[in-house]
Image: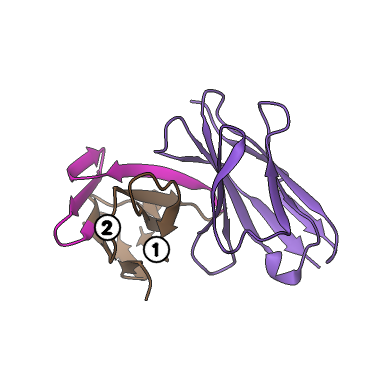
Amino acid sequence: KNEVEQSPQNLTAQEGEFITINCSYSVGISALHWLQQHPGGGIVSLFMLSSGKKKHGRLIATINIQEKHSSLHITASHPRDSAVYICAVRVIQGAQKLVFGQGTRLTINP
Amino acid sequence: EPEVTQTPSHQVTQMGQEVILRCVPISNHLYFYWYRQILGQKVEFLVSFYNNEISEKSEIFDDQFSVERPDGSNFTLKIRSTKLEDSAMYFCASSRLVQPQHFGDGTRLSIL
């Protein structure tokens, strides 16, 4: 079983829609990351969370440590938001590696 | 904003040949990482490097792989004798403290 599971795997929506991508993990973590991977392959870090909620522009990330669940929301979605969104966790205190989910491919149609 | 730089962007190599992937981390960062992503699969951790030595490595990082920080600015990943299954996108990342990690744009390695 994967330590990090994302849903949905693929999501297509119309411009302007509110988007939610979910991430569940099965291990204790010290932090959770949301990353964006563009079609060319480059990875950009969006958020790092250990509790609560963070907001940056139209992006909002939340985490519930007790339920081992995180969500990434995009408000007023735009075609330029089309990308693969990846959840990754840092598993134990002192460990440095990130364990990645399989990603959610988001397509926003104009 | 400072960036992690990887070269080359695409490397094509014959099976059995040695390949070196190069990364220039952000200048004041102390932790360095290599990850790989086989086409269509999730990103996987290979190795982390701190204070001039490997601090953690995965099962993937066997004797065919090595890392080096030869001159205080570059961070390299060497694959000694490449196999077809080494074909993947390789990402370098760096961080000032253990996290957050900043990623390069990746090197696409194609083994023929």
Q: Which residue is mark 1?
A: A101
The residue depicted at 41 percent of the width and 63 percent of the height is A103
Residue B83, by quadrant, is: bottom right
- Name which residue type carries label 1: Gly
| Stretch in magenta | A41-70
Q: Which color has been applied to chain B in this rendered view?
A: purple
The location of residue B38, given as percent across then percent down, is 59, 65
Do discs 1 and 2 share a chain? yes
Q: In the structure shown, which secondary structural element does the residue marked by tag 1 occupy?
A: loop
Left of A50 or right of it: where is A1? Answer: right
User: Is residue A84 in sight in this rendering?
Assistant: no
The answer to whether residue A107 is above or below residue A80 is below
Q: Is the C terminus of chain A in the top left, top right, bottom left or bottom right quadrant? A: bottom left
Q: How many marks?
A: 2
Residue farthest bottom in this picture: A1
Q: In the structure shown, which secondary structural element does the residue marked by tag 2 occupy?
A: loop
Nearest the eye: A29 or A16: A29
The answer to whether residue A69 is above or below residue B27 is below
For the residues labelled 1 and 2, the Cα–Cα distance comes to 15 Å
Earlier along the polypeptide chain: callout 1 or callout 2?
2
The location of residue B58, given as percent across then percent down, is 54, 59
Pair 1/2: label in front: 2
The residue depicted at 68 percent of the width and 32 percent of the height is B74
Residue B4, by quadrant, is: top right
Q: Which residue is mark 2?
A: A28
Q: Which color has been applied to chain A in this rendered view?
A: brown
Callout 2 environment at 10 Å: few (<14), some (14 to 19), or many (20+)? some
Left of A67 or right of it: where is B8? Answer: right
